[in-house]
Image (cartoon, grey):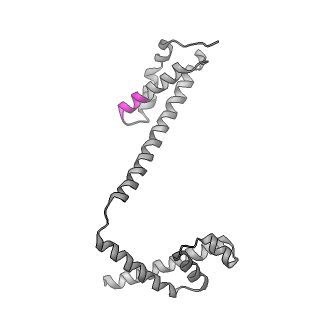
Amino acid sequence: MRRELSWDVIASHRERLMRLVRRRLPNAQDAEDCVQEAMLRAAAHGNLDRERIGPFLTTVALRLCVDHYRELERRRRLLRRAADVDAPEAPDEGVCDQDFGRWLLRQVHLLRGRERQVVLARAHGISTLEFARMHQISVKAAEGAFTRGRARLRLVCAKALDGVAA
């Protein structure tokens, strides 16, 4: 048997829900949408007890607030990715990046044994996991060597840039 709640019972919680949601959502329209959605879900729920309507509405409203922020974050990340893709690169930036990459690759000879090997492998598209398997070492050891090599290359870059600025 399906027990339907009257809209009056559900709507009697509206002001309490609005206060609850308004503290969590900065926009009044978003808060109103959230409360309306929670009330609609309660009305559509088939077997909700009258005694449980308050906690049910509270839980649904709070989860809708979380969903709201998740959606905002998802949109923000999507816009950031879309903005990066749409930004045309100036030709001189591409040339400078390629030249810098070639210079940096020449600096790899300053690295020691395993660090040099793993950085060169990564430059050729070989993952640290593949490198570890090829050289019969642990993945952790390969990742450590890569991290140390990258840190040393950063120092080489920093020293070179300091020399240019001077």
Q: Magenta stretch?
A: 26-33
Please state, as top left, top right, bottom left or bottom right, where the N terminus lies in the image. Answer: top right
List x then y, in percent, for residue 38: 49, 26
Where residue 67 appears, x then y in whole percent?
A: 49, 38
Residue at x-position 35% and y-position 55%: 83
Residue 135 locus on image (x, y percent): 67, 79
Q: Residue visible at 50% across and 14% down? A: 9
Q: Residue at x 45, y 46 (%)?
A: 74
Q: Quadrant of the C terminus?
A: bottom left
- 117 versus 130 height, above or below: below
The x and y percentages for residue 129 are: 63, 70
Vertical placement of residue 149 versus 47, above or below: below
Residue 143 in which image quadrant: bottom right
Would residue 30 be counted in the magenta stretch? yes
Residue 38 vs residue 114: left or right? left
Q: Is residue 108 left or right of residue 88?
A: right
The main secondary structure of the magenta stretch is helix
35 part of magenta stretch: no
Single out the residue that lies furthest toward the right.
136
Quadrant location of residue 161? bottom left
Residue 15 position (above or below residue 24): above
Query: How many numbered circles does the render carry?
Result: 0
- Residue at x-position 47% and y-position 35%: 65
Task: Locate residue 36: give its quadrant.
Answer: top left
Depth order, front residue of 102/54: 102
